[in-house]
Each structure stands twice: as C-alpha cells, then as structure tokens.
C-alpha cells in the first residue's frame, strides 16, 4: 500500500503565500532615527518579489549565498523572504563578531553578494580587501550620506529595486535545499556554520505557533528584540508571517529601554522576545520611570538562564516572562517553560525559571558528563543535554567539529541540565563552565542566580579557577547597581548566600568589576573572564 | 552548500514519545454502559507497547493493514498509536457503510486482522464469509458475552494483551510510509481509499495545535464527538497526544445529548468537536433542561455548514462555535474560521459562519465551474475549491478516480465556494448539489440555512429537481420540531424566505418529511432524497 498524500515541499515560499494571500493589510513597523517606517505586508510582499528580480539581475542563482549585515528592520526582513524563496541561501552575519571572524565566515560560506545597513558600513570596512568571494555590496540606506569606506563600489538597495517588477515566478524547491546559514558565535575556535533547510525553517515555524509553544496568533503584535543577525531571530521573522501577526522591529535600538517602552506603547505590542540583559535594562527603565506596558502578555526570554530576581521583578510589573531554550544549532527553539495544569500554582515561578519541556518536534535526553550514559529524569541527576529533531543540526558546514553528534545521531548541546519527572529541563551550566570542586559539581548558573538576587547587585557571573587542593573553586565577578558601587563588600555577598546554596558552593572570592564582558550574542563571556582573571589568592599563596 | 539539519523522520512515533515522556499522568476517560473507564496516558502508553507485541505475535508486519471497527474509546485509541508506530497501517472502518461497501473496503485495503468492538459484532456479522483477506478477528470487549455471530473463531483483546511486555522496540520508519487509510463514504460509486502517511499525520497535528487553528493546549480537555472511524476523528487522537490534553471519549453515545452534557460537566471538558446534527441535538437538550457548560470554550463544528440559527442558539448558551472545513482527502482540516483582528466585532457572527481561511500548511484556490479558470477572491465569484499541501490527497488507493487532481497538482474538492478578500472561504454547495436554474447558480446550503432559521423548523435540506423551463428548480425537504408537526404550512416557510434570499431562489415546493436521510458521516444525504423524490408538480403537469 502506497501513501496517497501530495508531495508538497515544506518551504519558506508557503509562508510568503500566506503573507500575500491572507495578511496583506497587516503592518510591519520599523524604528527609525526619527519616528518609524510603516508599511503593510502587501507592500512588503511586492518588494520581496522585486528583491528577487534585483538579485537575479545581479547574478544570484539558486544555491548562491547572499550575506546580510543588518539590524532588525524591514529591508532585512525582505531579504529573509526573497533570498530563500528564490532558492538562494540567506547568510545572516553576526555584526558583533571580531573582524577576522567576520571575514572568515564570509569566505567560509562563500558569500558573493553582501547586503549591509548603511549604519554598519564601518563594521564591514574593517575587513575591506579581505573578502575575496564578495563581488557585490548592496547598501540598505534610509537616504543619508554613507560613512567613508574602502569597500570600493557599492550599490544602493532602493535604487536597484525601484524599477523591478512586483511579481517573480518562484522556482519549485526541494524542501531539503538550504534556506539559510548562521554561524555560531565561536567562543572556542572558529565560528561554525549551521545550514538551515527550507524544511527545518518550515517545521520550526509550525511548532513555534502552537498554543503550547510561543502561542502567536494573528491578533498579536510581536517585537523581536533578539537580533535578526543571529539564530533566525528565534524564528520570529517566519513565525509572524505564517500567523499574520503585526511585526514591530527596533532596528539598532535594541539595547535602549526607553525606545522599547515607546514602541510597546505606541504599537500595542503584546509579545516581546530577547535575552536577559535586554530585560534587566528594560526593568530598570520601567522601575525608574513608572512606565506601564499593559498590552504585553508575554516576554519571551532565552539565550541564557533568567535570573530569579529578574523574573520576580518583571512579574511585579505585570510582565510575565516565558523562558525558552535553544541555540544556533537548534534553529533555535528547543524548550519553552509553560507550567502544566497539574503543577501547583504556588510553584509557578520556580517552574517558569526552568527552561521547560521540549516543544513538539524536539526530543531530548541527558547524558552523564563522565560516562555518557543516559540519566534519569528525576530532577537531580545532571548531564549534557542531547537533542534530536527535524530542525536540529546534524553537523556544520565544511564538516567542522564532527564530534558534536553522538554515534546514534543526537546533537550534543554542551549544556548541562537536570530533567524533572514532568520533562522540564533546568540548565545548570555549560559543559565547559561547570565547576568540579573536590569531585562534586557546582552549577555556576545557579550560583549566579543566587548572587543576582542580592538587592545591590546588577549582574554577576561565576567561573572556576584552579585551586591547589580542590582542583577548582568558584569566583564571582559582580557588577553592583551604580548607587551601591562604593558600599558593597564581598562579605555581605557571601553572607547573603549562606542560606541559599550549599556551604561549599559559596565562592572563595567576590571580585567587583565595572562590567561583565559579553559575547556577540549578548551573553556573559566567561572565557574572557577566565583568561584574564588573576589566580585565586589561595592558589598564589601555596 | 549542503543543509546540515538532522534527517529526522516525521512520524506518529514522536507523538507517542511525548505521551510517554511528558504526559504520563494525564487522563483518558471513556464513557461506558455504566460510569466511565479512566486511566492515565502512562497506562495507555504501556498498553500501546503491548498491542504492538500482540499484533506482531499474530503475524502483523510493517506495511500490513489492520482494520478497526470501533467507536470512540480507549482501545481504539491504543490501536491508533500501536498500529502505525509498529509500521503497520491503521484502517478505520466506517461502521455506517452498507454491508457490501464494508466488505468492499476490507478487501480493497487487504486487511488481514480486524479489531472490532463487541457492540459492533452484529455489523461485522452481516459480511461474515465475505471478507477473505481477514485471517484474525480480535474483539474489544468490556467483559460481557458476545452477540451471536457467524464469524468463526474470534480472539479477545484483553486476554491477548495480558502477558505481553510493556516495551516494544519501535522500528525506524520512513516518514512517507503509510500510517493509516480511511475510505470516503462513497455517496457516488465505490468508497475510495485515502492513504495517510506518517508525514501527513505529523504535519496535520503540528497545524491543528496552533493558536490560529484549533488552539489546543495541555490544559485543555477535549471531547471528540466526531467518530474515530472517519477522517481521523479530525486529527484529534494525535493532536491531544502531542499537546498532552486530557481526552474524553464518548464511545457509542455520540448522538446522546444528555450523555454529552454529563461528560462535559463531570470531566471539565473545554473543547468539543462534531458535525452540526450533533449540536442541533445538544442545543435542544440544553434548551429543554437548562443545563450549563461553563468550562466549554470552543465547539468545533465541521462536516457540513453550520446553520446560522444553530450558531446563534449556541452563542445564546455561551457556547462559541468554531467553524472548520475539510474532508477525508484533506486529513481532514483545511480551514478554520477565527475572525481577524481587523474585522469589526459586529460582523463576527457572519464571519464565523464562513468556513474560514486556510490553516498553516494548506493552500487554496477556486476554479470556475464551467471553464476551470482561477477566480478572484472577491467574496462573490464562486467556483470549485481546489487545495494543495502536505496532508492533501494526491489520489486514492488502487488509483481510483484519478480525475480528482488538476494537471498542476491541486486536489479538486467537489465543494463550491466564494473566497473573500481576507481569504475566508464560504462553502455554498457541492458541485453535484448546486442548482443551475435558468442559467444562474443557486446555493442549496444558503437556502437551507435560511429555512432552518424558521422557529418551527428542526432540519431542512434542498435539492434541485428537473424543470421543463428552468432546467432545475429547488425543492426543500423540511423536518419540523415535534411540537409544530401538525401546524406548519409550505406558505409560511416560503413567506419567511421572501426577505432573506433572492425571489427566484425560493423553493417551488416545500415538502414536510419525518426525517432527513443521513450519510454514514452524519450529513444530509441528498442523493437518497433526489433519487426517491417525486418530480416537481409543474414538471408532471407539462
């Protein structure tokens, strides 16, 4: 018996079909230097067709890679649709990479065309002359003069589009054709390319929209504060199109709490998404100004664990955070923490601080850090999270780092977690950050959460440093709130921790610093801290 | 550039994985002769493994067809999971087919094993000796004596399971392997087999759970009154498992309003699903008893168009109906009518009476009934609905009726509809039912809706009969509410219609009948009416 279902390929073209056929009147709003740019999905779709004509005219063919170095704005969104729909590959360039990394990934992916925001020309200029694969540079510009550069001739996106037809005959695509590529931020070694297929983008979108996942509907207004140059902006560019939700884009003002508040209020935003550092800033802004965001029903937060004090503080402002977990290699969504109906209401906050159960389409397990054996879901045993599913990486471009797959085909995430009997994942660390002290594991993330609950602390991170007796001991790097900069002592932090973590978890040293170094994805950069840290006093003494 | 995503097959096994890993403590409740049967998803999953062992022991191999002749109950659900997960094919037998049709589809599918509810043995007995492919008959029995039959030896499901191990090593499946087969009800010619793949079942499930579709979450309690022996019970058996929703099954008491009310109240049901005739009965029961269903937030309704009076009556009882459209060949969900945020609240009822826009994964168009040309989405032009997507039939088993596909690969549904500029489909008829009178089209569904709004009318259906001058003219067959049986005249129905439909749409004759014949799927059977109807008075006169 043969199945009799249509062989309909799962592609980004279907998302565009919905945008054009069902949601033409919905809006896409982009923050600008002054005011906003506003147009409809109908206007957007017509320009997507024009972009495809324009790129074809410039020589882009199916399979070719087109790089984008751009913030969260409507032109970047047009490229998100036009490039894969015409069969080419969207390569989102992480503008926070070091120049040599940026040059490396452009060459590694073989980008022939780059589309760059005018405001980011200085970033690209740092690698002028070092990107031999690139034949054409197209500038996305609101109209001003370009910054000085040594990039040679550049073309203007708007001028190129102006006369292109607004209907492009999209080719029939194989669902396993590449749609996009994104490089990991490469905290260790060179960045590695994760190549998304049309199939993976389509399926990720189908999961994101479910009631038990991000629960996005047509009536929602979504403001992604997570960069479109990294990890598909958590899949939101396609998810909003599939659902027909109104989209609000912050362009380069992502770290600016006042701008975010203003956009939420003026555009009736209902769903926000971003990393904890964004929300730490926003919360301070809200607390200082008394601003209200009554329409926002969900603040999706991922990228690193939500500090408990942040979730509690947001909750006090009526802002419910939804903890999500994933990475570039998982497209990126892997888990979302929505409490189950059987879980008691009084445990809701604690449950929502976990990363949550896998979303439909994703399977998870944890493996012992030493032996690799599968561990029970008892909420106690912790091991490396391994994951599989149709939007999980099977490897990297050019077969980089093949050791990230298990022999039976699961992706090794490098995250360390427990899983409770209800299937809720709680990330306790990264395999490279977890501290083994005297033969026992210490979770640096849990320690950081405990320290950040101290009322004088703004940010904190913990790394393990070499110790003559215990092999490693934890050291906390702490940034105090500006008003407490002078008046906070290591002792009061350590005292604060005594009833919150095991005695032997309390950091040997508390070091106050002005700022915690961040990775290109906005996460605490522990590698930089570890490399530059002075050794433990006790280690020097012996 | 090659994509680097895992080649993870989309199968029903993933749904079972979620049931086992994430939702073990959730409940499945089945109505019984006395009281209910209640167990957890954990108990269920263990038995699914046992069923696979049992079927394997009985000789079932990957690709083999196993038929089920059963109501909506937990054993049928076990078969829904065990059969496809072991690589065999679930063939749900429509117990309302004529005996010769039932025998035909069992042989056409080549079922080797049949699983039959004890209460349905009399149905199967009618074809005893006429099902040569069947080697084994397994009876699903709550424990009583079996009805007398001539089926030869039968095996007992519970006895067979009792000693089987509760872990089965599921094979790795190709996502395009067949998972299930369901035959159309065959109102014209022999029933035709639609063969679902694992891929189609998985993808359908991913769409059903979205906020913009049936919006089912873990916290919901779903009562499918749509039979599990037809069109996948609208995909609910897998959707509830994927979401982890509590499931309440009515077994054979689907047409019994009092039982449905009792189940809703005792089990805190939030979502109901069924055809209009079910809700017509339920509404009468509610109106007569004053019963309240405060927990129910959605009554999904499909199979045929919702009469406006039904939706208004349900609304008055606080029951919001969600109109869905589809058919066996579309797995079955194709559209769901949720008003858009831009549509005015005062039009909400009218909008929800339409079948709605296509759900994510489905593409639609309408084609001129005469020329086949694609028609505009203007809410006026009406033509045949054509559809494509990964869970839409590309044909039938044994290549029956190949004319149902267009040359460019769309499925011809046989439904006639308009599509408005917002993409909302409004089904106006079936291609075989729509009336062409004097060169103009008359929608029988619209006429029926108008007649059923009459306070004395319980049910009504309209067919076209031959007319010497106009080629066809509409005739209405009307069932009055019992209390008005004697006191309703054709004239008052015709008068009632004068300001509701075009003058020339008003049926030439109104014929009162005791009951409208129904198809096996519970729809009005117009073919039976047409075949048996006396000719028009005017046609006889000339």
Image (spheres, coloured by chain):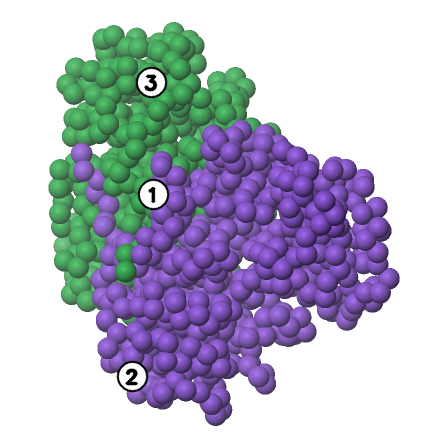
Chain colours: A purple, B green
**Chain identity of mark 2:** A
On the same chain: label 1 and label 2? no
On the same chain: label 1 and label 3? yes
* Image coordinates for residue B178, horizontal then vertical, percent: 25, 36
Q: Which residue is mark 3?
A: B53
Apparent side of residue A40 relative to residue B387 in the rendered image (left or right): right
Residue B370 is at least partly visible in this image: yes
CA separation, marks 1 and 2? 40 Å
For the C terminus of chain B, the quadrant is: bottom left
For the N terminus of chain B, the quadrant is: bottom left
State which quadrant residue A280 falls in: bottom right
| Disc 1, SS | loop
On the same chain: label 3 and label 2? no
Apparent side of residue A136 relative to residue A413 in the rendered image (left or right): left
Using the image, determine if residue B166 lies above or below residue B322.
Answer: above
Residue extending farthest front? A542
Residue A80 versus residue A506: which sits nearer the camera? A506
Q: Which residue is mark 1?
A: B8
Residue A28 versus residue A523: which sits nearer the camera? A523
| Disc 2: CA contacts within 10 A as few (<14), some (14-19) or many (>=20) | some
Residue A322 versus residue A384: which sits nearer the camera? A384
| Disc 1: CA contacts within 10 A as few (<14), some (14-19) or many (>=20) | some
Name the residue located 22 percent from the left edge and 29 percent from the top edge.
B63
CA separation, marks 1 and 3? 25 Å
Q: Which residue is mark 2?
A: A164
Name the residue located 60 percent from the left edge and 44 percent from the top edge.
A434
Mark 3 and mark 2 residues within 8 Å of each other at the beta carbon: no
Name the residue located 60 percent from the left edge and 63 percent from the top edge.
A518
* Image coordinates for residue A373, horizontal then vertical, percent: 47, 30
| Disc 3, SS | helix
Q: Which mark is residue B349?
A: none
């Amino acid at each position: 018996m043969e199945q009799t279902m249509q062989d309909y390929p799962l592609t980004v073209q279907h998302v565009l079909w919905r945008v054009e056929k069902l949601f033409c009147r919905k809006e896409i709003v982009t923050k600008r230097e002054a005011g906003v740019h506003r147009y409809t999905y109908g206007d957007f779709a017509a320009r997507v067709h024009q972009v495809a004509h324009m790129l074809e005219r410039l020589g882009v063919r199916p399979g070719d890679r087109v790089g984008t170095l751009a913030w969260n704005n409507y032109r970047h969104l047009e490229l998100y649709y036009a490039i894969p729909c015409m069969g080419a590959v969207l390569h989102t360039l992480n503008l926070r990479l070091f120049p040599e990394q940026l040059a490396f990934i452009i060459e590694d992916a073989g980008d022939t065309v780059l589309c760059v925001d005018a405001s980011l020309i200085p970033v690209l200029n740092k690698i002028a002359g070092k990107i031999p694969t690139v034949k054409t540079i197209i500038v996305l510009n609101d109209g001003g003069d370009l910054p000085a550069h040594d990039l040679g001739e550049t073309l203007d996106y708007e001028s190129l589009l102006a006369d292109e037809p607004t209907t492009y005959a999209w080719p029939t695509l194989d669902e396993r054709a590449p749609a996009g590529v994104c490089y990991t931020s490469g905290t260790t070694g060179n960045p590695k390319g994760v190549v998304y297929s049309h199939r993976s983008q389509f399926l990720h979108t189908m999961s994101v929209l479910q009631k038990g996942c991000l629960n996005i509907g047509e009536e929602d207004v979504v403001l992604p504060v997570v960069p479109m140059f990294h990890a598909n902006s958590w899949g939101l560019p396609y998810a909003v199109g599939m659902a027909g939700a109104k989209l609000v884009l912050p362009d380069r003002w992502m770290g600016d709490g006042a701008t975010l508040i203003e956009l939420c209020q003026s555009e009736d935003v209902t769903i926000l998404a971003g990393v904890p550092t964004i929300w730490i800033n926003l919360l301070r802004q809200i607390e200082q100004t008394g601003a209200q965001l009554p329409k926002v029903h969900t603040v999706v937060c991922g990228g690193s664990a939500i500090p408990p004090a942040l979730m509690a503080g947001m909750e006090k402002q009526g802002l419910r955070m939804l903890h999500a977990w994933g990475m570039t290699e998982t497209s990126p969504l892997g888990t979302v923490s929505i409490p189950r109906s059987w879980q008691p209401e009084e445990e809701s906050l604690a449950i929502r601080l976990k990363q949550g159960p896998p979303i439909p389409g994703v399977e998870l397990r944890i493996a012992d850090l030493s032996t690799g054996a599968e561990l029970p879901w008892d909420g106690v045993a912790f091991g490396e999270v391994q994951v599989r599913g149709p939007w999980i990486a099977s490897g990297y471009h050019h077969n980089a780092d093949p050791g990230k797959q298990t022999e039976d085909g699961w992706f090794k995430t490098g995250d360390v977690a427990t899983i409770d009997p209800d299937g809720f994942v709680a990330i306790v660390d990264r395999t490279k950050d977890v501290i083994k002290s005297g033969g026992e594991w210490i979770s640096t993330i849990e320690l950081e959460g405990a320290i950040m609950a101290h009322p004088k602390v703004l940010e904190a991170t913990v790394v393990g440093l070499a110790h003559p007796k215990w092999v490693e001991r934890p050291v906390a790097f702490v940034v105090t709130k500006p008003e407490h900069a002078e008046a906070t002592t290591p002792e009061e932090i350590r005292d604060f921790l005594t009833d919150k973590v095991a005695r032997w978890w309390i950091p040997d040293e508390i070091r106050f610093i002005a700022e915690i170094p961040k990775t290109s994805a906005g996460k605490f950069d522990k590698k930089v801290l570890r490399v530059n840290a002075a050794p433990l006093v006790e280690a020097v003494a012996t």
